Amino acid sequence: MEDEDVKARAQHKKAVKEQKVQDESIDSVLRELTKLPEGKAFIWWLLQIGKFGEVPFTGNALTSSFMAGELNVGMQVYERVMRASPEGFLEMMKDHFLKVQVKEMEDAE
């Protein structure tokens, strides 16, 4: 019984260590992506398909449930980007809203 506990603790410790390495690798990639225009566009696309910033509730329970699932994914992407590079996220938002303003000005002409 003691051997099983020791093995279980060792496996848990190893899994935690591996998860930390994987998390840092993902965070490192996200930090690099937020430095590139293409990377910011890709992350913004992920947030858009994840319905980030949208309200998932409609008059239909099934549609609302589906949209809440999409939003869940979008919020996980948002949380991960904010943890890895909060300043990169803010820069990405500024870029996005600047593009929206430019497009609105062009459409108004």
Image (cartoon, rainbow, N blue to C red):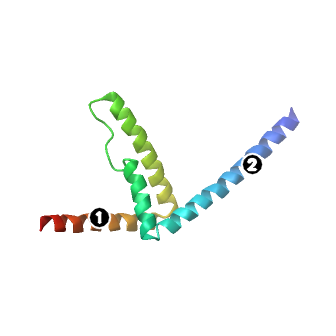
Residue displayed at 49% across by 64% down: 85
Q: In the rendering, at what x and y percent does residue 33 appear?
A: 49, 66
Front tag of 2 and 1: 1
- As drawn, the residue found furthest toward the left would be 109
Q: In the rendering, at what x and y percent does residue 47 appear?
A: 40, 53
Residue displayed at 33% across by 40% down: 56
Give residue 21's quadrant in the image: bottom right
The amino acid type found where label 1 is placed reads Phe
Name above or below for residue 93 compared with residue 74.
below
Q: Residues within 10 Å of mark 1 (few under 14, many from 20)?
A: few
Q: Which residue is mark 1?
A: 97
Q: Would residue 20 be found to the left or right of residue 106 on screen? A: right
Q: Please tell me whether mark 2 sits on a helix, a strand or a loop.
A: helix
Q: Would residue 103 be found to the left or right of residue 22 on screen? A: left
Indicate the quadrant containing the C terminus: top left, top right, bottom left or bottom right: bottom left
Q: Please tell me whether mark 1 sits on a helix, a strand or a loop.
A: helix
In the image shown, does 40 or 90 lie closer to the viewer? 40
The amino acid type found where label 2 is placed reads Lys
Q: Would residue 26 be found to the left or right of residue 70 on screen? A: right
Q: CA distance from mark 2 to mark 1?
A: 44 Å
Residue displayed at 31% across by 36% down: 57
Marker disc for residue 22: none
Indicate the quadrant containing the N terminus: top left, top right, bottom left or bottom right: top right
Number of callouts in the render? 2
In the image shown, does 46 or 88 lie closer to the viewer? 46
Name above or below for residue 1 compared with residue 16.
above
Q: Which residue is mark 2?
A: 13
Q: Residues within 10 Å of mark 2 (few under 14, many from 20)?
A: few
Mark 2 vs 1, N-terminal side = 2
